[in-house]
Amino acid sequence: MKETSLKVSNIHVKAGKFRLKDISFEMKKSDYLVILGPTGCGKTVLLETLVGLREVTAGHVHLNGKEITALPPEQRRFGFAYQDSLLYPYMNVRDNILFGAKAMKRDREGAVLKRLEGTTQKMNIAHLLERYPRSLSGGEKQRVSLARAILLNPPLLLLDEPLSALDPKMRQSMQELLRDLHTSEQIGILHVTHDFNEALQLGTKVLVMEEGRVLQQGKPMEIFNKPGTLSMAHFLLVENIQEGEIIKERGLSYFRKKGNSLLLGPLNNHSTNSVPDRRKAYLVARSGNIRLTLPNELVEGPAPNRWLAEIVQKNLYHTHVDVLCNGCGYWQVAISISDWQRMGLEIGAPVCLSLKKEDLHIVEERNFK
């Protein structure tokens, strides 16, 4: 248990009519764990449970090997920052940051005051100590809130959508600050959000929730390329979701797209080991995982699944081109600007699309009871 900062084992929680059901995960001090899911999936309820604001009806929570399931919030000593900074308007920045220390009668300790000085300098708010919250920007308020949360060196920092109210430029600045805090403070961070870009930018691990359950957990890119359910594929804005069925031939599984004869495979066993023959399923593919080539262009490496299509639309961005193609259905493909120019592509041009075997990810509709 020495390496594990937090261990949550099969917890159940009641919150009115809502339920958290059988939640389990672990995180180490070196982890930046992002809890991701749509509004209403239970992210904030889970966070409030961990901090001690909600009662666990079953299961256990351990911190550094010690059970804290029934401990009150003040004995858990977690740092906590909400979406709204929740600063006291009648206190200046200095007193807001020292509020927790004052409640513990530690606000005059030399070590705490030294920590205040170092933390505010690191977070670039030392010049704001005598100002009041009403005169601060949104980003400044969040920095003050974070400084308050980490002042007394908590064992874990819990963040409830801390960046959602910020403009894009300030959000990027705060992401850089959170990455720096995670590294320099050597503190585990558990960050709740519905923004999957935050999860990609910040998380070393991602835990996906749906309807009060843990649906999936793992490394960020694994989650985003291979979501566990159809609803999560939609939530994560996967560009290509094609309906079809699983066909099994000679011990191998293939995906056949609905409405045409496109057959893709063979599929990896882990995608279909519980899927009977001719079971309804969906192919989920990121636009960047589909390759676009000219029909007569040679493709290096093992022959991938390939089919002919025609370009019907393009959207040009400063980093890439999104190409919409019609061929055995509609497909969105992301290619570089240089490839678009090199191939001389235009609306109506015939192209060849292909998917590698490892990028054939299959999901089913899933309803929890």
Image (spheres, rainbow, N blue to C red):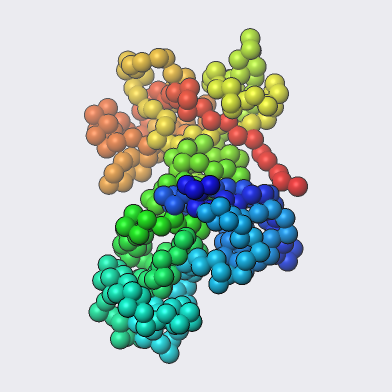
Instruction: Estimate the x, y position of residue 269 in percent, counting from the top left.
Output: 59, 22
Task: Say if 255 sits above or below 121 in the image.
Answer: above
Farthest residue toward the top?
250
Residue occupying image coordinates x 38% and y 25% = 351
Query: In this view of the protein, which residue sits in the foreground, 111 or 305?
Result: 111
Answer whether residue 196 is visible to the viewer in this image: no
Q: Determine whether, in the image, residue 336 is placed left or right of residue 208.
A: left
Which quadrant holds residue 179? bottom left
Task: Say if 144 sits above or below 256 in the image.
Answer: below
Instruction: Estimate the x, y position of residue 291 in percent, counting from the top left.
Output: 39, 27
Instruction: Estimate the x, y position of residue 197 in percent, counting from the top left.
Output: 42, 51
Instruction: Estimate the x, y position of residue 312 in percent, counting from the top left.
Output: 41, 35
Task: Say if 235 sits above or below 251 in the image.
Answer: below
Residue occupying image coordinates x 58% and y 39% = 228
Residue occupying image coordinates x 61% and y 60% = 68
Q: Determine whether, in the image, residue 124 is placed left or right of residue 45.
A: left
Task: Say if 267 sits above or below 75 in the image.
Answer: above
Q: Determine whether, in the image, residue 208 is placed left or right of residue 351.
A: right
Farthest residue toward the bottom?
90
Answer whether residue 150 is visible to the viewer in this image: yes
Residue occupying image coordinates x 39% and y 71% = 151
Query: In this view of the protein, which residue sits in the foreground, 75 or 93?
Result: 75
